[in-house]
Structure formats: C-alpha cells, structure tokens
Amino acid sequence: MYGESSDLRSFVPWFQSHEGFVDVSVMDITTFPGHGGRGVIALTEILEGHTLFTIPRSLTLSTRTSSVPAMLGPQRWKNYGLDKGWVGLILCMMWEEAQGASSRWSQYMSDLPMTFDTPMFWSASELEELKGTSVVDKIGRDDAGKDYYTKLLPAVQSRQDLFSPNLIPQYYSLEKYHIHGSRILSRSFQVERWEREDGTIEDNGNGNTSTESEMDVANMSAGSGMDVDESPADAPQPEESDDEDAVDPSDVAMVPMADMLNARYGSENAKLFYEESLLRMVTTKPIKAGEQIWNTYGDPPNSDLLRKYGHVDMVPLSQGEEGNPSDIVEVRADLLVSVLTQQNHEISPESTKERIDWWLEEGGDDVFVLETDLELPEALISMVRLLLLPDGEWAKARDKGKPPKPKVDPQLLSLILLVLRRRLEEYPTSLEFDVALLSENLPLTRRHAVIVRVGEKQILCGTIEKLLAMQQALPANADEDKGKKRKGGSAAGEIDERPKKTKR
Ligand SMILES: C[S@@+](CC[C@H](N)C(=O)[O-])C[C@H]1O[C@@H](n2cnc3c(N)ncnc32)[C@H](O)[C@@H]1O
C-alpha cells in the first residue's frame, strides 16, 4: 500500500480526496533511519520532466485560503497586526487545528511535526555551544513571544465566540505559537497570486478573482507557467518594512506533499512550478529507482540550515574533507570599528560615527560576509579605508557620494588580519579542538553546533592564511608598483585585490 513504509497511511488518501494528484507508480514517502525524518523516494527510474504530484492552490494553507481572516474581518485583522509577518498564518494554523476533523486540513495538520531540532528549542547549555556563530542572535524567540502577547493573544481574546477561552491552553498557547512558527520556517513556500493576461488575479485557486487595481500587487513578481520556479521552503520571513522586495505575508503558504521533500547541498532533482490553479512538482533530472527525490532549500550555509531546519549539510569537499560549500562567516562592522579605534588613536568617535551613518545611508551593510572561496569582501576593504581616510579626503568622498575603492595596502592588510583574529577569539574553542571533537560520539545538538563552528572557523583561518601570504608578497609588489609610478605616473603602492561582491 502507498506510504506503507511511513507513518502517513491516511495522508495520501486525504491528499487525493482533496484533488491532489500523486503518481504512486513512481514515488513513495518513506521514513529514513537516523536523521532526516520522512522523505520521498523513487520507486522506478523516473525521466526528467515527469510530474510527481500536483496540489490545487485551494489545498495550500495560507491567510488567503483559511476562513479566519474573513471571520475576524479585515479591519480587526489589520488592527491586531495580523497582516504583518507570520502571525496571521500562525493564527490560521491554530484555528484549523482547533477545528479537528471538520477542518479541510485536519489530516495534514495532524501529520506535521510537533518537535524540532532547531536551536529555538535548545537549552541554555546547548546554545552555549553556538557561541561565536551568527546563529544565536538570529533565533528570535523573544521577538516571537512579543508578537504572541501583543498581537495574536489579544486578537484571540477579542472574539470569544470564535476562540473559546477554554481552548486557549490547548490550541492558542505560546508553546503552540512556537511550534507553528517552526513549521512555517522549515516547510512553507512563497506562493504568489496568479496574474492572468487580462490583468485579473487568481487569488487562491477557489475561483476568486479580482482586478489588479483592487489589490496590493506591489510585491508580486508576475509568474507564468513553467517559466516560474518555486521559492524554496526557506522563503524569507515577511518583514514589517516598506522594502519593495519584502515578501507579501499572504504569499506564505503551507503546501501539503511538496513539504515532504528533503534537501541536500547541490542535490536538487525536483522542483515546484506554479500554474494558474495548481502547483506542480516536476523532476529536473533523471532519477534512478531507490534514489531520494530532493527539493532545494536554496543551499544555505550550515548556520542557516540549523537555525531554520534543524540539520546541517556535509558533502564531500576537496582532499577527502566534508563540509558545506555554502558556509559563510559574518564579521560585524562594530568589531571593525573597535579594532581600528584601538590601533589608530587619531580616529575620533564622532568622525567614525558620521562615516558609518553615511555608509549605511548609502546602502552599505553593517555585516561583512566571508565565504569558502576565502576572498575578502569588497565592502569590508572599502569600509576600512573609509574609516582611515584623513578628514579632508573623507569630506571629498562624501561630497562625491563614493566610498573608497576596495584596494589593499600593507597597513590595511595588517588591520584586517587583526579584525579576523579578534573575530576568531569570539569562539570559546579553537578549530583544532573542534575538529578533534567531531571524532567523538556527540549528542546531535552538540554535533550540529560543532559542525557550524568548524565551517565558520575554517573560513576565518583560511582567509587569515591567505592574507598572511599576501602580506609576504606585498613589499616586493609595492616596490615594483612604486617603480612603475615613477616611470608612468600611474597609481602605485597598492594591490588591487578585486574580490568578488558580497552576497548581501
Ligand atoms: C520540508 S521538511 C521535509 C520533510 C521532513 N523530513 C518530514 O519528516 O516531514 C524539512 C525538514 O526535513 C528535515 N530534512 C530535510 N533535509 C534533510 C537532510 N538533508 N538531512 C536531515 N534532515 C533533513 C529537516 O528536519 C527539515 O526541517
């Protein structure tokens, strides 16, 4: 029987009875031993371009398809701030769960996970293991708690006819809020409305349409058939901002069946495509019988994988090593400022603040991202140079609206080396210590934390090594360049590092 190898025997019949199509002759849902939970495997060889399953838009669960927003009314929905971020969708999920068998999504809701390996649910001592990584500051448990108490709970308490007070502990608690939030974080998709050629918009697959002028479509990137691929399950949390690229909260949707696919770095062999009334999961490569069918979560670094999904990727790298090629390490601008002001007492706090404010106003970032290619981010070099500029040149740069060019010289290299060494000291343990730890039998949370730390420290140590080599090469180059300047009068004494642009 389909799904026999998993604990999902009722799920597929439910899916099919709600007009979901699944090609049971080629795929099955299975539970993997060890970690990874459930996933999808190929039962036979599958060719590229094969439809594995389709989901009607009306079966996705979002603030567009749930009846809760209409029951509360648009004004109240807005007044309680349910139109921002994920809080509205969380309320819909709570409501649907509270309806039991009468909810359209009852079977789906009961098959969603209740526990997670994400740091959101780690103890204080487990979180200590992540010290120095960029994970801890991004968990956001306190912000989620604030949203629960200031938005969701007041909305629930304002309509006792809809949300019976004696159901609050079971379905509308803070604990449930975190569980639904984690389900959204690890499984949701960004499903945009369908815009027809005549300008009307398919709202939720239920045949509801409206004209473009009636709707806020500012954030929509209009989709059309197979050209538009899916936004991975790590769709960014909709921000409460005016940013035009911000995700429309009503686009965030739970997508039954599509969220059964696991992901691994560089392994994607199926993808979700949007059509007018349904979503279609299609193979993007030929798949052999017995192989896992992988979606993509966007191949994030292990720090993000752990924070959002509760697992890490370890794929073979060069020289027999394993790791995640997408790993990154973040260096905050305030660390830069602290090192520079310690080293150069001529830098005044007022002038530094002015320069940083200008940098941010010009769209610069206050975090620099180092990647596994060990290239120095242009922005990092440019900001160090900005902070070192004599006052007159700083005024000129500001007037021209141009930050300094990202060129490396010996002084700058020494300063960046100091910054990276200080960044390395933010971790309580060394890279060697962590690498040795990995050969021990560690509990899962600790192993994951150590893997994240190792990935970040390898980038830092590798970049430091590279800068040391550059430093050794510099005097010769600098002399050569000076010679050139004397002859040709061109810029000299500096190596144009030409690193690639940062991703953020
Ligand atoms: C979209 S769901 C995929 C289905 C999920 N495995 C289940 O049992 O319902 C994403 C979750 O699957 C797990 N997962 C996905 N890919 C994985 C991988 N390569 N290794 C370990 N766990 C993975 C993580 O727990 C993640 O939060």
Image: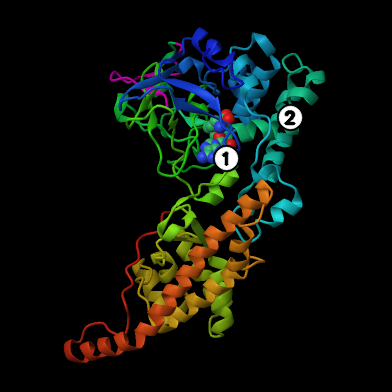
Q: Nearer the viewer, residue 182 or 321?
A: 321
The answer to whether mark 2 and mark 1 are in CB contact below 8 A is no
Query: Does 183 sit above or below residue 200?
Result: below
Query: Does 89 sit above or below residue 429?
Result: above
Ligand 1 occupies quarter: top right
Q: Does the beta carbon at disc 1 come under 8 Å from ligand 1?
A: yes
Give the extent of the magenta segment.
192-206
- Where residue 89 sits: x, y (%)? 59, 27
- Where residue 424 sits: x, y (%)? 58, 69
Q: Does the beta carbon at disc 2 come under 8 Å from ligand 1?
A: no
Find numbered disc 1 in the image and state the secondary structure of the residue it sits on.
helix
- Where residue 306 sits: x, y (%)? 58, 46
Is residue 200 found inside the magenta-colored segment of the image?
Answer: yes
Instruction: Check residue 309 in the rendering and tell me which mark sits there, or answer none.
Output: 1
How many labels, in total? 2
Instruction: Check residue 153 in the rendering and tell me which mark sits there, or answer none.
Output: 2
Query: Does 462 sit above or below residue 141?
Result: below
**Residue at the image point whose x is 71% and y is 57% from the top:** 128
Disc 2 crowd rating (10 Å Cα; few below 14, some 14-19, many 20+) is some
Position of residue 190 in the picture relative to residue 75 (left or right): left
Instruction: Check residue 54 in the rendering and tell me which mark sits there, or answer none.
Output: none
Is residue 496 found inside the magenta-colored segment of the image?
Answer: no
- Where residue 121 sits: x, y (%)? 70, 42
